[in-house]
Image: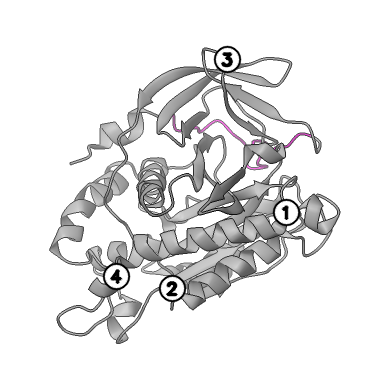
């Protein structure tokens, strides 16, 4: 059983940041931060600003923490530990069921679940495909979002793909995308993904899986978030499944300053799908493989999806899942992180309440 202390001790919960999202600062295109091990080996390269206290879980599950960032944009780290990834699965529907709230899939036979997708940074694009790193409007990242949505649909999963624009790409973008998240939550999804691309050298994300050129996918979890322990556990358990299904697909997990609207639900995860130096086609292939990971994570092996009563509930939704979720609810309650939508009685009620303000 995972304790509350174990969930929160490894990463500092950041509270001293202002509402203007000053943490979401990026370097100019083709300028990068480089995070290195104590021995000087490169952990990751990114256009995202790195701060002291940020952490990174590598593809091989080695956790490093940033201890200082020099004036050459080199983030120096200390080694924390080798992380044993959790194997339990989570879903919003399971959380709702445990709390006695209505569960949409329980009312529909042969339901295969629902996944929501959106883009906070709509302008992000891929130079080899789009000819530029940014388009003021619908950027190349939307092609990757569409590939993700289409791949999930081919697997029989309902998707809510919101292409709402939150321009410009500035500090207020996450504030503007917050309404999009609330609207998606009202549709009762099992999980939500905010799809981005990073800014990094081509080699940072380029890889081959099953002899096909793809980009890796990186998870980003915000430290300015009362749900941090749950977000972290979810991201790591999803990586564990990805490592089984497509080893090498997930580049790592960046635990950085920020919120990324993950306070609204523990299962809102930011994805970096390649970098601006990769092609949109390679990113689309990578996110299509990730769709299979999502399918397996939330809904399990296809030959085990029909329950005894013929209802199409997510696997693990019975006694075993209830046991593994006990720590989740204990954490949420003890940490004061019973998020707004649960207190409101559901996603739709929360949205209506906010609209009345």
Q: Residue at x 55, y 53 (%)?
A: 211
Q: CA distance from mark 4 to mark 2?
A: 11 Å
Q: CA distance from mark 3 to mark 2?
A: 43 Å
Q: CA distance from mark 3 to mark 1?
A: 29 Å
Find residue 102 and report its horizontal and vertical position in percent: 30, 75
Q: Residue at x 29, y 67 (%)?
A: 301
Instruction: Tell me which corner region of the image, top left, top right, bottom left or bottom right, holds residue 297.
Output: bottom left
Where does label 2 land, which residue? 114
Q: Nearer the viewer, residue 25 or 56?
A: 56
Q: State whether residue 119 appears in this view.
A: no
Where does label 3 land, which residue? 40
Find residue 323 and report its horizontal and vertical position in percent: 16, 54
Where does label 1 land, which residue? 279
Which comes sooner in the sequence, label 2 or label 1? 2
Where does label 4 land, which residue? 314
Q: CA distance from mark 1 to mark 4?
A: 34 Å
């Amino acid at each position: 059983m995972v304790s509350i202390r174990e969930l929160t001790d490894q990463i500092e919960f950041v509270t001293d940041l202002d509402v203007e999202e000053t943490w979401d600062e990026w370097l100019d295109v083709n300028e990068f931060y480089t995070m290195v091990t104590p021995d000087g080996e490169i952990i990751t390269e990114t256009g995202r600003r790195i701060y002291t206290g940020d952490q990174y879980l590598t593809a091989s599950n080695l956790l490093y923490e940033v201890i200082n960032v020099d004036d050459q944009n080199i983030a120096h780290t200390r080694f924390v530990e080798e992380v044993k990834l959790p194997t339990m699965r989570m879903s919003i529907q399971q959380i709702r069921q445990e709390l006695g709230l209505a569960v949409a899939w329980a009312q529909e036979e042969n339901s295969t679940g629902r996944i929501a997708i959106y883009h906070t940074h709509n302008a992000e694009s891929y130079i080899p495909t789009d000819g530029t790193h940014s388009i003021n409007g619908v950027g190349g990242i939307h092609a990757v979002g569409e590939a993700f949505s289409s791949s999930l649909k081919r697997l029989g999963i309902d998707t809510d793909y919101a292409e709402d624009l939150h321009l410009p790409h500035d500090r207020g973008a996450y504030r503007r995308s917050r309404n999009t998240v609330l609207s998606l939550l009202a549709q009762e999804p099992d999980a939500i993904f905010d799809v981005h691309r990073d800014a990094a050298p081509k080699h940072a994300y380029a890889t081959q899986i099953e002899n096909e050129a793809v980009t890796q996918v990186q998870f980003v979890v915000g430290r300015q978030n009362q749900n941090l322990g749950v977000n972290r556990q979810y991201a790591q358990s999803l990586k564990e499944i990805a490592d089984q299904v497509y080893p090498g697909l997930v580049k790592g997990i960046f635990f950085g300053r920020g919120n990324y609207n993950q306070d609204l639900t523990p299962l809102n995860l930011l994805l970096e799908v390649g970098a601006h130096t990769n092609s949109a086609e390679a990113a689309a292939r990578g996110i299509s493989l990730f769709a299979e990971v999502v399918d397996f994570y939330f809904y399990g092996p296809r030959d085990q999806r029909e329950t005894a009563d013929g209802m199409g509930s997510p696997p693990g939704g019975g006694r075993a899942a209830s046991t593994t979720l006990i720590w989740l609810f204990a954490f949420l309650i003890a940490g004061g992180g019973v998020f707004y939508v649960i207190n409101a009685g559901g996603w739709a009620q929360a949205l209506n309440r906010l609209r009345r303000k």
